[in-house]
Image (cartoon, helix red, strand yellow):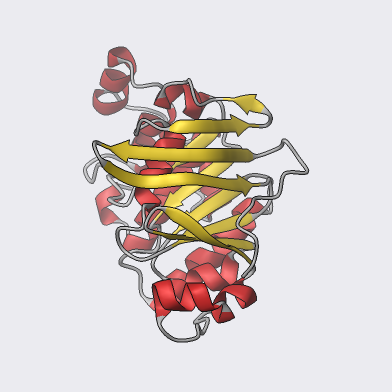
Amino acid sequence: MSSTEPVTSSSDGLQARGITVRYGGVVANQDVSISVPPGQIVGLIGPNGAGKTSFVDALTGFAKASGEISMGGRRIDSLRPHQRRAAGLSRTWQSGELFASLTVAENILAGARPPRPSTIFRDLFLRHDPGTAMVERALEIVGLPGSGGVRAGDLTLGQQKLVGVARALAGGCSTLLLDEPAAGLDSAESEEFAGRIRRIVDTGPGALLIDHDMGLVLSVCDTIYVLEFGKLIFRGTADEARNDPAVIAAYLGVPIEANHG
């Protein structure tokens, strides 16, 4: 079985060490350590209830946890969620949670600013120029240039997913956490999404990808971690994951085939 210890040769990117999350007497994560270097896509997979979302919540400050979390060598585990976002750690959400009646630009701006009452009011009830540099840059990165003035509700599901990524990237992002970003997409959309994420990461940020689409994870990730009952049981490449006995027993039951080329 491949090592479950993260690469530690660089302080760049996201480093998480010994993360433990408890909900009362239930241990959701136990001593989990990962590394997400810049310019790489790291996958986090595991069966339902393995603790994947709890771990992402711990990284972003939405779940109380013990352990150390750093960005670029700077400890951030004592910071609040919006402060971690300001430090360059950003995430998408499973629900997508776009405001269908607002434009794409308004959705991006609403998620790119600290959640103060004054900015919430301004973002939701006042009109913005959809051609602002920040919005246009984020939309160009995700492959939706010029769509700032389009109502979010008029987009396809795949496009809405990309707007969620653009919102996470806007305002600066060193590490992007993608929580089930391909949920609801068909095979063609998922493959296109995978290529887009790879191109985004090639511009500099690292990404942690949590998804049940095994073809997506195996085709696009440089390194894969596997959780079972809140513990890491594997760290390695996609090829190693396909044939690792512990991964097969815990998650798949049979050797894995990638669905994306």
Name above or below for residue 5 compared with residue 186: above
Evaluate whether residue 160 shows in this view: yes
Name above or below for residue 120 compared with residue 98: above
Residue 175 vs residue 56, the one in the foreground: 56
Q: Residue furthest right?
A: 9
Indicate the position of residue 189 as horizontal and vertical percent values.
42, 71
Evaluate whether residue 137 shows in this view: no
Name above or below for residue 10 compared with residue 190: above
Q: Residue furthest front?
A: 25
Residue 27 vs residue 167, the one in the foreground: 27
Indicate the position of residue 216 as horizontal and vertical percent values.
49, 70
Indicate the position of residue 69 as horizontal and vertical percent values.
55, 32
Please give the name of the residue rendered at 41% of the width and 64% of the height, measured from the top-left corner. 46
Question: Which quadrant of the rendered structure holds the C terminus?
Answer: bottom right
- Quadrant location of residue 1? bottom right
Residue 20 vs residue 224, the one in the foreground: 20
Please give the name of the residue rendered at 39% of the width and 63% of the height, measured from the top-left corner. 182
* 103 relative position to 227: left or right: left
Residue 228 vs residue 47, the one in the foreground: 228
Please give the name of the residue rendered at 41% of the width and 70% of the height, measured from the top-left corner. 213
* 87 relative position to 122: left or right: right
Please give the name of the residue rendered at 48% of the width and 20% of the height, measured from the top-left corner. 78
Name above or below for residue 109 compared with residue 183: above
Indicate the position of residue 100 as horizontal and vertical percent values.
23, 46
